């Protein structure tokens, strides 16, 4: 479970996050929905421990923020922005490298890599350098890397960006299976249909603030509208009022 | 269990070794010295001093060129292909990641230096005394530290290539200056990394035994400058725009 409390982050003169708070429960996919520049990526990078907030904090599985970013990173797997793979290494080698950095014992790591290759359907590409991979194959290798240490919490930043339809469907199935195993998944997107299709809960971000939080049906009811799109417009145009 | 530093170093060594184009390029730069000096030796006779001076300059340069491709790929390249953020997601301190990459770059620098010395040994049957040859290897640690620091300042491989190419001119120019300048060998020059190595190397190739005090002093000065470069690189890796921004 991830709890984000009153995050603030400034980059020079730009206030990327003004006040972001939300809760992402276990066994559910929580969608961060917002326009470009709303603060989705910055929020996810802070939750992953690669950026430090100026104020506020993140609690993951009840671990106190004072435990430091490394304690947080042991509990979180992330696929942020782009796949970012090593083109001269194979998925098996990338998973092994990542697993060693997570200090997984050698025997267990070998088993885990085989599990992931089967889970992600990567048998035919596991021993090919990733340099010539399609976007869908890259996504699978990057997702495998995010899952190598069996994290209870998974963060994805616009993971379907650039993927073709079969790859999007494949990702959706993989995420649903990961959720069924009890994981807490946080998923950022600016595509309403994607959020509606996948997410159990939605957090709407606008101008660096979390302006609304709940299931799609709850948000529509609160905004007094019929669709999530209309709810999104209602909450983001009233930024600061609904926060 | 292997430490994260060695895990990162091992990955960089494998990754760097598979970049065959870069390996061939680094090997050619390392062997450029023996090749050029061999050609000059056909043209001029009884010019031991000139040949030794050229050898020592090329040897210093070889300690830098072996690692440049790996250094530019290790941080600037990771930023460019967006694999740096996924790497930083691991529960490993940024200092450990940096040290692992530094060791890998230093290993490639040392391989370039060894190849250069082997080339001179093969063509001229001339090598610096073993103690001096060993004293040259800390220079690889310094070269790697400077290269990895420059890589942390760059947003992509092309930018890193520009600055790292300039860095390779430092040992070349400093070496040439020490060969031809009247101040060479006087005062504090012998304690300046690269310049001091040039003086020691030139004297050693001429058959003079290395001065133990000078070896220790230059080793100490080299370690200090390498430590400063690594500290600057570590500080740079903690900044937000390494994670964010193009």
Image: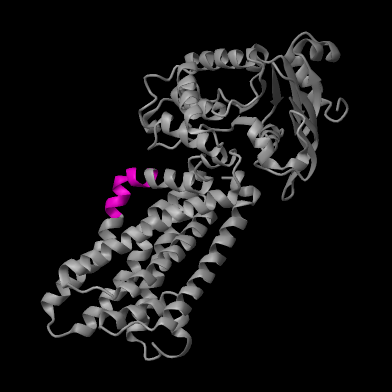
Residue B30 falls in image quadrant: bottom left
Foreground residue among A37 and B55? B55
> On the picture, is A184 further left or further right than B175?
right
Find out whether residue A225 is within the magenta segment. no
Q: Position of residue B209 (x, y in %)?
A: 31, 83
Q: Quadrant location of the C terminus of chain A?
A: top right
Q: Is residue B84 visible?
A: yes
Residue lying at 48% horizontally and 63% vertically, measured from the top left: B146
Q: Position of residue A212 (x, y in %)?
A: 81, 23
Q: Which residues are magenta?
A: B15-25
Majority secondary structure in the magenta region: helix
Residue lying at 32% horizontally and 50% vertically, measured from the top left: B22
**Scheme of colours in the image:** one colour
Q: Relative to A229, is A132 above or below? A: below
Q: Quadrant location of the N terminus of chain A?
A: top right
> On the picture, is B152 further left or further right than A243?
left
Foreground residue among B225 and A164? B225
Residue B207 falls in image quadrant: bottom left
> On the picture, is B85 further left or further right than A113?
right
Q: Relative to B111, is A37 above or below? A: above
Q: Relative to A99, is B73 above or below? A: below
Residue pushed farthest right?
A: A241
Find out whether residue B16 is within the magenta segment. yes
Q: Relative to A182, is B206 above or below? A: below
Foreground residue among B115 and A137? B115
Residue lying at 34% horizontally and 75% vertically, measured from the top left: B132
Residue lying at 33% horizontally and 71% vertically, measured from the top left: B133
Q: Position of residue A229 (x, y in %)?
A: 72, 16
Q: Position of residue A124 (x, y in %)?
A: 36, 19
Q: How many marks?
A: 0
């Amino acid at each position: 479970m991830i709890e984000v409390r009153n995050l603030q982050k400034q980059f020079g003169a730009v206030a990327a996050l003004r006040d972001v708070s939300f809760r992402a429960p276990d066994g559910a996919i929580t969608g961060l929905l917002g326009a470009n520049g709303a603060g989705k990526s910055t929020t996810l990078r802070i939750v992953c421990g690669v950026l430090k907030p100026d104020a506020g904090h993140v609690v993951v599985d009840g671990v106190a923020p004072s435990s430091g970013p490394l304690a947080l990173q042991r509990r979180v797997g992330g696929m942020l922005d782009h796949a970012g793979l090593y083109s001269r290494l194979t998925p098996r080698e990338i998973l092994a490298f990542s697993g060693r950095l997570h200090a997984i014992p050698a025997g267990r790591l070998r088993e885990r890599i085989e599990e992931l290759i089967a889970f992600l359907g990567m048998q035919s590409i596991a021993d090919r350098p990733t340099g010539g991979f399609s976007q869908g194959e890259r996504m699978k290798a990057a997702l495998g890397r995010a899952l190598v240490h069996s994290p209870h919490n998974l963060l994805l930043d616009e993971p379907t960006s650039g993927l073709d339809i079969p790859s999007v469907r494949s990702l959706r199935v993989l995420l649903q299976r990961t959720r069924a195993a009890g994981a807490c998944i946080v998923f950022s997107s600016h595509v309403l249909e994607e959020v509606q299709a996948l997410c159990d809960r939605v957090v709407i971000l606008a101008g660096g603030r979390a302006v609304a939080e709940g299931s799609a049906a709850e948000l529509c009811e609160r905004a007094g509208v019929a669709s999530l799109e209309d709810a999104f417009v209602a909450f983001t145009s009233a930024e600061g009022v609904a926060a | 269990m292997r430490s994260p530093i060695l895990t990162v170093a091992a990955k960089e060594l494998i990754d760097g070794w598979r970049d065959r184009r870069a390996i061939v390029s680094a090997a050619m730069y390392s062997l450029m010295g023996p090749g050029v000096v061999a050609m000059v030796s056909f043209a001029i006779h009884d010019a031991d001093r000139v040949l030794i001076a050229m050898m020592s300059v090329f040897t210093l340069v070889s300690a830098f060129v072996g690692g440049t491709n790996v250094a530019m790929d290790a941080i600037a390249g990771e930023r460019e292909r967006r694999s740096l953020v996924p790497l930083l997601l691991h529960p490993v301190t940024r200092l450990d990641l940096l040290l692992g990459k530094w060791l890998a770059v230093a290993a490639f620098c040392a391989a370039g230096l060894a190849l250069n010395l082997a080339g001179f040994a093969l063509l001229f049957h001339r090598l610096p005394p073993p103690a001096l040859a060993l004293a040259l290897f800390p220079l690889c640690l310094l070269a790697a530290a400077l290269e990895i620091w420059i890589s942390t300042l760059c947003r992509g491989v092309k930018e890193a290539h520009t600055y790292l190419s300039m860095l390779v001119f430092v040992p070349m120019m400093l070496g040439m200056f020490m060969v031809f300048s009247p101040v060479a060998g006087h005062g504090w020059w012998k304690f300046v990394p690269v310049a001091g190595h040039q003086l020691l190397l030139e004297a050693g190739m001429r058959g003079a035994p290395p001065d133990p005090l000078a070896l220790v002093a230059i080793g100490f000065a080299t370690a200090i400058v390498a430590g400063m470069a690594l500290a600057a690189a570590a500080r740079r890796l903690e900044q937000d725009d390494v994670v964010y921004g193009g």
